[in-house]
């Protein structure tokens, strides 16, 4: 075999091995990023959402109470009011 053939084969082997190692490193980094969710941050956001939902429910109940009161007032017969006053 010639010297050029041996050098070419070695370059090809090193190039392929380097590419495989690079791909393996990239895959490990992407797995690490996906495997570690931020539990504390998620928990805080869920707490904030729960507080917001509770506040919305409270305001909705207040609105419905006001609507019931208004409906009650409008449905009652008006009392006779003296004309002179």
Image (spheres, helix red, strand yellow):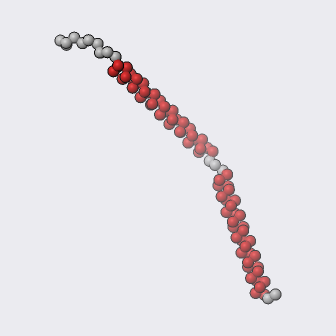
- Give the answer, above or below, for where 64 lies relative to 21: above
| The N terminus, quarter of image | bottom right
Depth order, front residue of 41/30: 30
Measured as percent of width and height from the top left, residue 11 is found at: 73, 79
| The C terminus, quarter of image | top left
Measured as percent of width and height from the top left, residue 27 is found at: 68, 61
Depth order, front residue of 73/63: 73
Q: Residue furthest left?
A: 84
Q: Quadrant of residue 8?
A: bottom right
Q: How many marks?
A: 0
- Give the answer, above or below, for where 50 lies relative to 27: above
Q: Quadrant of residue 31?
A: bottom right
- Give the answer, above or below, for where 72 lies relative to 17: above
Measured as percent of width and height from the top left, residue 55 is found at: 48, 33
Q: Residue furthest bottom?
A: 2
In the image, what residue occupies the spot 76% across and 83% down? Answer: 7
Q: Is residue 39 left or right of residue 7?
A: left
In the image, what residue occupies the spot 45% across and 30% down? Answer: 60
Q: Is residue 54 left or right of residue 34?
A: left
Measured as percent of width and height from the top left, residue 19 is found at: 70, 70
Depth order, front residue of 76/6: 76
In the image, what residue occupies the spot 67% across and 51% down? Answer: 35
In the image, what residue occupies the spot 31% across and 15% down? Answer: 77
């Amino acid at each position: 075999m010639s010297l050029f053939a041996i050098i070419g084969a070695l370059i090809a082997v090193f190039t392929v091995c380097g590419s495989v190692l690079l791909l393996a490193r990239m895959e490990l980094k992407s797995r690490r990023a996906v495997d570690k969710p931020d539990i504390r941050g998620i928990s805080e956001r869920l707490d904030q959402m729960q507080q917001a939902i509770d506040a919305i429910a409270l305001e909705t109940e207040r609105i419905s109470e006001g609507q019931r009161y208004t409906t009650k007032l409008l449905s009652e017969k008006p009392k006779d009011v003296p004309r002179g006053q």
